[in-house]
Image (cartoon, coloured by chain):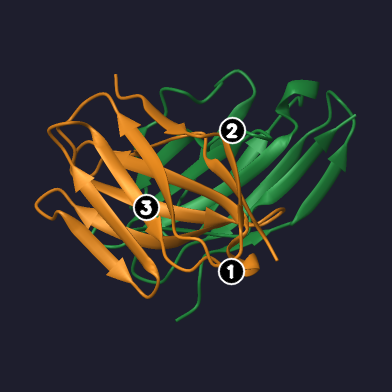
Amino acid sequence: EAGVAQSPRYKIIEKRQSVAFWCNPISGHATLYWYQQILGQGPKLLIQFQNNGVVDDSQLPKDRFSAERLKGVDSTLKIQPAKLEDSAVYLCASSSLTGELFFGEGSRLTVL
Amino acid sequence: KQEVTQIPAALSVPEGENLVLNCSFTDSAIYNLQWFRQDPGKGLTSLLLIQSSQREQTSGRLNASLDKSSGRSTLYIAASQPGDSATYLCAVKANYGQNFVFGPGTRLSVLP
């Protein structure tokens, strides 16, 4: 069974530029999460989808971050314009019916 | 609001030792608790999932216990090996359909 796929693995941009990350969850997983992980900390939820609907986006900085999951499968997270403090690893995860969480390898963003 | 803490922040042990990692959470009304391993520059790998009705789960040299009344979980690693060196994170889920709240992790070093 294929795991959670994410791309790109690494991205370096300058502040005020835009960036997009893509995620394809495990087949059949209805729930998809985007987390932000800053070095030395645990992941922090940005947004949670159930199929193509948003369940929780209370911690998403909506003035610069956006995410969509149009067909209820893969998802895109966008940052525009990026700030220095957005440098982090962006992790995508999906969960099974048992509630177990599975993560992708992450996308490491460096904002200069 | 659920808060998750992990003590110690870092731990160094000689190879072959048995060790215990701790996870504490403030709200005992949880749906499940999951332990993860994270290697540097990688995503999170699921180790064990404990449902709220369970007291423990075992996988190989790993044993995780859950005591909801005291808001604690422990991850026991038997006969530690250098390959066990990684950061170990726990995460709790309040209800089915809600997101996981993560602890900051314990960075484990097993010395040969």
Say what amino acid the circle numbered 1 marks: Gln
Circle 1 sits in a helix, a strand or a loop, which is it?
loop
| Host chain of mark 3 | B
Q: Chain of mark 1?
A: B
Q: Is residue B90 left or right of residue A60?
A: left
Name which residue type carries label 3.
Leu
Q: Chain of mark 2?
A: A
Give the camera-side residue of A53 and B78. Answer: B78
Count the numbered circles shown.
3
Which label sits in the foreground, 3 or 2?
3
In the picture, which chain is green? A
Image coordinates of residue A77 in percent, x first then y, are: 60, 42
Badge 2 vs badge 1, beta-carbon distance below 8 Å = no
| Residue B75 visible within the image | yes
Disc assigned to residue A41: 2
Asked whether disc 3 touches disc 1, contact meaning CB atoms under 8 Å apart, the reply is no
- On the image, the x and y values in percent for residue A55 come to 32, 36
Please tell me if label 3 and label 1 are on a single chain: yes
Q: Which residue is mark 3?
A: B75
Distance CA(mark 2)–CA(mark 1): 24 Å
